[in-house]
Image (cartoon, rainbow, N blue to C red):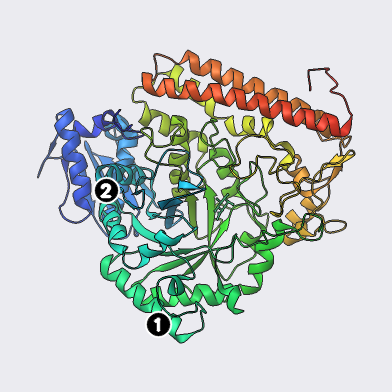
Amino acid sequence: MDVDAAWLPAEAFRAVGRRRSLVPAGGLVDTVRRELVDACERFGGRVVREDAELVFELTEGLGEEGFALTRRDGITTVTASDERGLLYGLFHVVRLGEEAFAGDRPREEHRPAYARRMLDHWDNVAVHPVMGQVERGYSGGSLFWADGRARGDWERVRAYGRLLAACGINAVTVNNVNVHETEARLLTDRIGDVAAIADVLRPYGIRTHLSVTFAAPVVLGGPPTADPLDGAVRDWWARATDAVYGAIADFGGYVVKADSEGRPGPFAYGRSHADGANMLAAALEPYGGTVHWRAFVYDHHQDWRDRGTDRARAAYDHFTPLDGRFAKNAVLQVKHGPMDFQVREPVSPLIGAMPRTRLAVELQVTQEYTGQQRHACWLGPMWSEVLGFRPDGEVSTGRLAHELVAVSNVGDDPFWTGHPLAQANLYTFGRLAWNPAADPRAILDEWIALTHPGADDRLTAGLHTVLDGSWSTYEKYTAPLGVGFMVQPGHHYGPGVDGYEYSPWGTYHFADRDGVGVDRSTGTGTGYAGQYATPWSGLYDSPATCPDDLLLFFHHVPYTHVLPSGKTVIQHIYDTHFEGVAEVEEARRVWTGLAGLVEPARHARVAERYEEQLRGAREWRDQINSYFLRKSGVPDERGRTIY
Ligand code: GCU
């Protein structure tokens, strides 16, 4: 099978391709020109020198990536101050279709809210014995690497760059944050492989970044230490970085996972994370590069008997004392929640607590804990909630952080994302990074219209029915009320209620015969709730005011605790699990009814995934309900079958 066109099928360019277009020449504008030439060849328009209906122009004042669109006297004009702006303007016109050429349009300006909108690939160069080619990858192999080498499928990488540009992503990290032996060498003797990827992505306005190991000097034959304050180490990084820029002049910078889950870091030398990050920032600074330093630092050798240590507190405890000490070109990359991309978590309190530090918020597009692209789970509503969170409780339309990053969900699968509907997650991430205030459902509309040109009302409504509430459905049959990690250890797919309960990973639910949940209150618990500013600290601190969907994240409550809905916690657990399965049954039914409206191979792939989703949802329902019935001894009020 050919590679799926995702949200850029040829047909999406019909309106543009019918027009006479005028476009300047040179640099990235050539990307725009090539798009127009291709579209015109297909649909009968022309790229012209005068008398155009669609004009692209460079002017002043629209910032690095912004663009303006106007239509007057039968001419649609896209202006931008930078070539990338023209590219984003082109895709905007593509999204509008015929609407961009109908009647006059007052000038509208578009600028991205987040200047860097980055995807991190957790791709390994060499196949890892446990994690495979792509860590937490559910879409086949890597687009970039295969069996220890660059994959060399440049057409595919080019098509990828084009898809990313069309949803607004402008930075890519090409390898896993867990940097193993082969991957470490991308920094030095294998930088040519990275440069080749950068060359293909550059025409789409995408800068290339690299994950590096903090121990690089040691493992790559430099000084025998990686101490960030050691002069020889600093020189080694300066030289290595100079060579990187020799190969890739617009290289974006390094991503570092240090002192995290066994990766090397500055702690081994008694240095702080600011020392570590700033050393790399200093090496990158002369070339305009950035270091993304991850805040995912916690004790993964915790003793489950120790109730005083709370993994949720870790990032805040480690990093807030360092606020103001990071270099200007160091960005602290913080996972959106304090734990690890669970189905439901509060927004990390670290995000509001580092006013003097550049922050990136990290989301996970790959569905590690949300169904692994075998279950349909559209994460737009989750991300929209996260990005709309205001640490001080004020309502504002500003940004949550300086940058947005997400872990990619693509691979060499013909549909890119394994589950074809998971394409919507990638598209939505890019668009929300451009405009976090956008209604995610409107973004889904765009995705539907682009991916299925000519979609009729039935198809559009059907896709909304199966996707709009799919995150909530997933939450219902897996982990309601904010409890996390009831998954099978290691691969994290499917239910494993006690899978992590007695493990060293700091991920517990503390279910006993009387109740469930983690007491993170300031009075009797770990004090985590106190890491928030008001009003959140107060709201989260008491079970009476804590939002129900986070109740078990913040509190250990009896099964008989009554929720605002009037239901007890135990009855809520039973009810949501039955509801979640019923919702999957309904989604599967709706999807079956869309046969004939969706391209057959795509329909079949999704249909197959629904079978697995339904099997999985039933398994979740029955294991969770049986577990809590057995623990609590409280029967289901409605007398349904629980095992
Ligand atoms: C999760 C995930 C790991 C990953 C880690 C990280 O724990 O399971 O595979 O390496 O996050 O974000 O670094």
Q: Quadrant of residue 234?
A: bottom left
Return the residue at label 2. 152
Residue 235 badge: 1
336 left or right, relative to 563 = left
Q: Give coordinates of residue 547: x percent, y percent.
A: 75, 43
Q: Which type of secondary structure does the marked residue at label 1 adopt?
A: helix
Q: Give coordinates of residue 139: x percent, y percent.
A: 44, 38
Q: Tell whether circle 1 marks a residue whose Cβ is less than 8 angstroms from ligand 1.
A: no
Residue at point 31% right, 67% down?
A: 189
Q: Quadrant of the N terminus?
A: top left
At label 2, the amino acid type is Gly
Q: Which type of secondary structure does the marked residue at label 2 adopt?
A: loop
At label 1, the amino acid type is Asp
Neighbor class of circle 2 (other Cα within 10 Å; few <14, some 14-19, many 20+) is some
Mark 1 or mark 2, which has the lower sequence index?
A: 2
Question: Whole-Å distance between the Cαs marked 1 and 2?
Answer: 33 Å
Q: Looking at the image, which is closer to me, 119 or 182?
A: 182
**Can the viewer see residue 271 in this picture?**
no
Residue at point 28% right, 30% down?
A: 2
Residue at point 39% right, 16% down?
A: 597
